[in-house]
Image: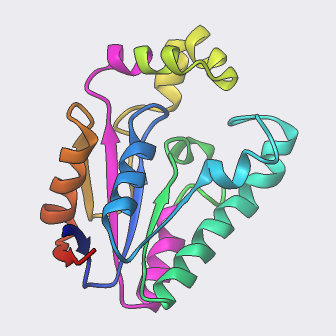
């Protein structure tokens, strides 16, 4: 017999944070432990089309459709009585000053349509030094600019970037992901344990 979790209240869960803050591990961990969870990531949508990040002609073309896919995914999954878990940084939206600056409003709208809570988990690296170490160790080609222009990167994507929403859980990713997931499920998402008979 094993235990999974169920969130009874209709909830749209977004896991956000700067690159290498630990959001993807955490979001996947939540989805793995939730019986009624449904996971999607921004990178899952964009990566087949481009290796660009933040800039570039292809990125500019797919940025809008990616956002709309995430919102539509949330809408569909809430309609199916699932808990959508959206893994996306949203750490640059505050300075772009475009239609996606207020990125929480469309998700709030979808939540309202389904009488669902919009719960946002912000992942925070333990330190700037650890963030740099993580970025260096993953070796992605789109991280070269970040490392060469470190101060500018931190200015553009601050760890504590503004989130225009009142229901935000700040999580420092300095513990094993299993412990973080358990804390968020029980204390923030108010999930109930559910015994599985295998």
x 41%, y 61%: residue: 14
Note whether 14 is above or below 162 in the view shown: below
Looking at the picture, how far across and down is residue 27, in whole percent?
40, 53
State the image coordinates of residue 116 (x, y, percent, origin top left): 36, 84
What scheme was used to colour the molecule? rainbow
> In the rendered image, which quarter is residue 131 located in?
top left
Q: Quadrant of the N terminus?
A: bottom left
Q: Is residue 36 magenta?
A: no
Question: As displayed, is residue 113 above or below residue 65?
Answer: below
Q: Is residue 2 above or below residue 152?
A: below
Between 119 and 101, the one nearer to me in the picture? 119
For image coordinates 36% across by 90% down, the residue present is: 115
**Residue 97 visible to an observer of this rendering:** no
Q: Magenta stretch containing residue 116, yes or no?
A: yes
Task: Give, as a single range, the part of the protein colored magenta.
Answer: 103-132
Q: Residue at x 46, y 23 (%)?
A: 154
**Position of residue 1 in the picture relative to residue 78 (left or right):** left
39 or 116: nearer the viewer: 39
- Residue at 82 percent across and 35 percent down: it is 56
Which of the two residues, 194 or 50, is positioned nearer the viewer here? 194
Instruction: Where is residue 170? Give x, y as percent.
Output: 24, 47
Is 189 rendered above or below residue 120?
below
Query: In the drawing, does residue 59 fall left or right of residue 136?
Result: right
Could you tell whether 95 is left or right of 57 in the image?
A: left
Which image quarter is the C terminus in?
bottom left
**Which x, y percent locates residue 45?**
69, 55
* Position of residue 8 in the picture relative to residue 42 (left or right): left
Place residue 106 in its image quadrant. bottom right
Q: In the orientation shown, which residue stands out farthest toward the front? A: 198
How many circles with numbers are drawn on the protein? 0
């Amino acid at each position: 017999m094993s235990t999974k979790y169920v969130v009874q209240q209709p909830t749209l869960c977004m896991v956000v944070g700067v690159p290498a803050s630990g959001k993807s591990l955490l979001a996947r961990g939540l989805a793995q432990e939730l019986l009624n969870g449904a996971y999607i990531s921004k990178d899952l949508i964009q990566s087949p089309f481009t290796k660009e990040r933040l800039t570039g002609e292809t990125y500019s073309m797919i940025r809008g459709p990616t956002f709309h896919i995430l919102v539509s995914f949330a809408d569909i999954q809430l309609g199916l009585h699932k808990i959508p878990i959206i893994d996306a940084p949203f750490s640059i939206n505050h300075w772009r000053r475009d239609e996606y600056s207020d990125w929480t409003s469309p998700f709030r709208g979808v939540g309202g349509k389904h009488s669902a809570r919009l719960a946002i988990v912000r992942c925070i690296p333990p330190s700037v030094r650890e963030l740099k170490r993580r970025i260096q160790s993953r070796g992605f080609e789109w991280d070269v600019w970040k490392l060469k222009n470190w101060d500018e990167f931190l200015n553009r994507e601050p760890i504590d970037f503004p989130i225009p929403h009142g229901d935000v859980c700040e999580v420092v990713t300095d513990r094993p992901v299993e412990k973080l997931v358990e804390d968020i499920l029980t204390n923030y998402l108010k999930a109930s344990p559910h015994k599985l008979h295998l």
